[in-house]
Image: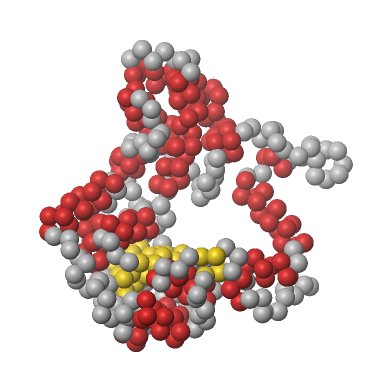
Amino acid sequence: MAGIGSMEQMEEALAARWPGRADQIGEVLSLIGKPSQPGTSFFVYGTSGTGKTSIIRDCVQSMGRHHAYFEVGNTSKPRHLFSSVLSQLHRFKRKRDKGYAGVVCDSPTEFMVEVAKACPANQASTAFIILDNVHLLAKGTLLQALLHTASYAGANVQFILVSRHGWVASEFCEGTCSDGLPQVFFPAYSEEQLLSILKVPPPGAVRSHLESQVWGHYVSGVIYSHFSSASNDITDLRGLSRTLWDRYISPLRTEQVNPAQAVDRVVRALMAHFKKQALHTAMAKFEPGLMQSADELLRSSQQGAPAAVDGGGGSSAWGALPRSARLILVAAYLASHNKPSSDRAVFDAASGGSRGGRKRG
């Protein structure tokens, strides 16, 4: 059982890992409760990139609470949600080609029965089901049914609902949730908070004390100064800082820049190298929301582009297209040539291929 001291230490450790989120972490921990206390369902909201999901999962794991996580998508089907959540609560392993071992569930009623088996009312502590992007379940009755799992089935389980929109703004169905459901708001990070997070080097990034000194100048002078106007999403900026770091620091590691100089002179020299060799290409290639590799960010538009796509021998504009546009075009081409049987095998494995094929116009 976690005592008062250990709870305070846990809260301090979480706040240190997530700068600028001490208030939200305190609220979340109090709602999850100590292992000896019953937890409660609650609603978490805030714009993309505010750390909602990562912090919630970190808090639940730090508290040692058994939990399941499911990210709702635009094409998510109820049985996918049921199977994923139940497999995690039952600690089943997912089979890549055959869905979830031991889980066959197609209705909310069956789901409640299975949840009660995995999380009986007499279990020691409350389990949590985390539903991310829950605003996509706003229309319809599924969410309302799920939130009654504990009362209808007698399961010791509660829900943590994560949304980009507030409860009113997202047009949730009336009666979906009690007006008294606790809500935790994650505001957008301020410039100071973003920089304080980015200035903590990710594990394994820096190799020396000098590099750790350079890192802070790098994130403020390169990442935040040149890329935050395109995205203030902490996930984007954190990923970008790690992706470009090896290219930025390379002149120091290869001693093109003298490491014996003062730190400010090292930083100026590294910045000059990076501006000349990589910065403008990376700025042109950066696309928020995509986990791009260094090769994708730093390769010029001419490299790797097809010679022509119109059959007329003219210059191709393929390399100048954003990566997301190229992926959409390739996906559309593949989808148009994919057999219905292949669609079922890949996307509808849980149904055993019993549904009819895709109709073609």
Asked if one can make out residue 161 in the rendered structure from this viewpoint, the answer is no
* Position above or below: 180 against 153: above
Query: Which residue sits at x=69%, y=33%?
Result: 303
Q: How many numbered markers are drawn?
A: 0
Q: Quadrant of residue 172?
A: bottom left
Residue found at the far left of this picture:
4
Residue closer to the observer: 231 or 41: 41
Residue 361: x %, y % from top left: 78, 73
Name the residue at 50% across, 80% down.
105
- In the displayed structure, 315 sits above or below 145; it is above
Look at 73% across and 41% down and name the residue there: 317
Q: How is the image coloured?
A: secondary structure
Q: Nearer the viewer, residue 289 or 201?
A: 201
Rendering quarter of residue 29: bottom left
Q: Is residue 13 left or right of residue 70?
A: left
In the current view of this chain or complex, which residue is farthest to the right? 312
Q: Position of residue 360 (x, y in %)?
A: 77, 72
196 w.r.t. 180: above or below: above
> Which residue does the image show at 25% across and 45% down from the upper left?
16
Q: Quadrant of the N terminus?
A: bottom left
Q: Is residue 36 left or right of residue 59?
A: left
Camera-side residue: 220 or 215? 215
Q: Is residue 77 visible?
A: yes
Residue 85 lies, in percent from the top left, at 44, 71
Residue 211, above or below 33:
above
- Measured from the top left, where is residue 212 in percent x and y? 34, 28
